[in-house]
């Protein structure tokens, strides 16, 4: 067709001019490379206008799909150069943020904001063309991946990064700043892309995930060190005397000594570390949806602290009436200090409900415990462990039977489901029954049939649910 021959001639002439502009004149090339989005828009508008102006009913289109592809191919070299320039300029920004010559240097807030603004500019420049936007997003993904790798190299490790008893060290301050910077990049870039088609997030998701992962890893050792410290304090519950009738044994004016250490440690962590991870206006972590890395880690730590306390309070043996009162006072102190300094306890779900149910459980009559509604909020293993404190001495607990330390037994509990824990408890019940039978007795402690009743449903459970 005549139109095909005319279009082929036009494409060849335009291709020749574009090739000349790309190779012969660096000035023209630079203008067309930097202005490629506008050049692409002009060519596409030209094609659309020709198609519109030659749209005659019953007549074939003046430009076929192949013809459009041919015309766009004439400026492909400028597209390649444009994308290379995008990658190069943004990579230079990353290298300036984290120069190889100085490990441990953290960029300023202004530098991070400038980096995010440049990415926004790149997206804004091409957002009217869906295909070009995806090409640019792929380059941005490479840059974000580079940023994650550079930032990961800056994370401080070692004892200085994990201490939680003194003031924040320079290593910890740097790690916290790094976390906040990367979190800001992740949050703002995610917001930028949220208004684009879904495929845009799919393109950037791996690199944004890397950014978030490095931010998370930069402060995780700090939170883990704090959790280890709090667990160590709570383990001292087994050094206290909860079997005597003296209400003040092992206490000062503030409560049990081990709980005082827990309180001091949490308050110190809040003032010395969490305060640096929180925005100035934030006093509590109230949002679970869209929560920050700090809020996520703090929520997890707070939940673990409550769970750990419930576990070890249930293991206390012997436990007198005054001992129960002391433990409930410790529960109230723990709930208060966690709620005021870590995370709102009401939002912690099952760990909080278990803590609240443990107090009335201590004072529930043994004969009524089997049908108590408190069982709904407590893992069955917690209830069973507590019942040992009501049993005769000859009914040994799994802790006594295995001759493990409370810490060792706790570590084992972390790895087991309720079914496996029940097997250990059942073994002690069998030993107790054998002792009674061996001496010819027929009367068992009331705790024995109750424990069998509470534990028997666990025998068919899957080990997926971890015990307390």
Image (cartoon, grey):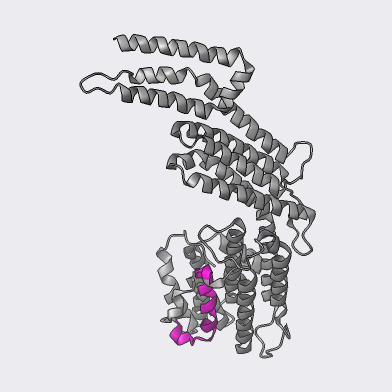
Is residue 100 toward the left or the right of residue 354 in the image?
right
Q: Residue at x 30, y 9 (%)?
A: 2
Q: Quadrant of residue 6?
A: top left
**Which residue is most to the left?**
58
Q: Residue at x 61, y 39 (%)?
A: 118
Q: Residue at x 62, y 77 (%)?
A: 336
Classify 263 as above or below 15.
below
- Give, as a single range, the part of the protein colored magenta: 347-369
**Which residue is most to the front?**
53
Percent x, y of residue 257 = 73, 78
Quadrant in which the N terminus is drawn: top left
Classify 457 as above or below 254.
above
Quadrant in which the C terminus is drawn: bottom right
Q: Quadrant of residue 266?
A: bottom right
Could you say which is closer to the camera, residue 423 or residue 57?
57
Percent x, y of residue 38 = 51, 29
**Magenta span has 380?**
no
Q: Residue at x 50, y 69 (%)?
A: 349
Classify 291 as above or below 140.
below
Q: Is residue 193 among the parts visible in the rendering?
A: yes
Overall secondary structure of the magenta section? helix
Is residue 456 toward the left or the right of residue 402 in the image?
left
Q: Is residue 427 among the parts visible in the rendering?
A: no
**Magenta span has 361?**
yes
Could you say which is closer to the camera, residue 464 or residue 373?
373
Percent x, y of residue 177 = 70, 52
Could you say which is closer to the camera, residue 241 or residue 308?
308
């Amino acid at each position: 067709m005549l139109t095909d021959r005319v279009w082929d001639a036009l494409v060849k002439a335009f291709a020749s001019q574009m090739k000349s502009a790309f190779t012969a004149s660096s000035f023209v090339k630079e203008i067309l490379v930097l202005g490629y989005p506008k050049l692409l828009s002009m060519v596409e508008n030209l094609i659309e206008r020709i198609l519109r102006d030659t749209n005659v009913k019953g007549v074939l289109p003046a430009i076929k799909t192949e013809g459009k592809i041919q015309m766009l191919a004439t400026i492909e070299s400028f597209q390649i150069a444009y994308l290379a320039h995008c990658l190069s300029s943004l990579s230079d920004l990353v290298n300036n943020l984290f120069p190889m010559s100085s490990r441990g240097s953290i960029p300023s807030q202004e530098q991070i904001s400038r980096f995010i603004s440049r990415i926004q500019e790149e997206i804004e420049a091409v957002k009217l063309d869906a295909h070009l936007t995806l090409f640019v997003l792929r380059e941005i993904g490479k840059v974000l991946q580079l940023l994650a790798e550079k930032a990961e190299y800056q994370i401080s490790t070692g004892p200085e990064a994990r201490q939680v008893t003194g003031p924040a060290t320079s290593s910890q301050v740097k790690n916290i700043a790094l976390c906040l910077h990367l979190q800001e990049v992740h949050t703002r870039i995610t917001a930028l892309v949220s208004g684009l088609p879904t495929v845009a997030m799919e393109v950037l998701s791996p690199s944004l995930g890397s950014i978030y992962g490095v931010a998370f890893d930069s402060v995780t050792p700090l939170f883990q060190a704090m959790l280890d410290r709090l667990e160590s304090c709570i383990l001292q519950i087994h050094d206290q005397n909860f079997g005597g009738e003296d209400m003040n044994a092992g206490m000062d004016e503030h409560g049990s000594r081990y709980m005082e250490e827990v309180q001091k440690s949490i308050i110190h962590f809040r003032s010395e570390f969490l305060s640096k991870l929180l925005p100035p206006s934030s006093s509590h972590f109230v949002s679970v949806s869209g929560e920050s890395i700090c809020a996520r880690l703090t929520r997890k730590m707070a939940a673990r602290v409550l769970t750990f306390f419930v576990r070890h309070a249930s293991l206390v043996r012997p436990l007198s009436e005054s001992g129960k009162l002391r433990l409930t006072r410790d529960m109230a102190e723990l709930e208060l200090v966690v709620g005021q300094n870590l995370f709102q306890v009401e939002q912690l779900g099952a760990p909080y409900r278990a803590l609240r149910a443990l107090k009335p459980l201590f004072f529930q009559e043994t004969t009524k415990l089997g049908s108590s509604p408190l069982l709904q909020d407590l893992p069955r293993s917690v209830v069973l462990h507590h019942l040992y404190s009501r049993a005769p001495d000859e009914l040994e607990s799994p802790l006594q039977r295995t001759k493990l330390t409370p810490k060792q037994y706790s570590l084992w509990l972390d790895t087991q489901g309720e079914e496996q824990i029940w097997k250990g408890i059942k073994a002690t019940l069998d030993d107790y029954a054998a002792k009674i039978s061996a001496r010819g007795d027929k009367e068992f402690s009331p705790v024995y049939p109750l424990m069998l009743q509470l534990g028997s449903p666990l025998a068919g459970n899957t080990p997926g649910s971890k015990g307390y």
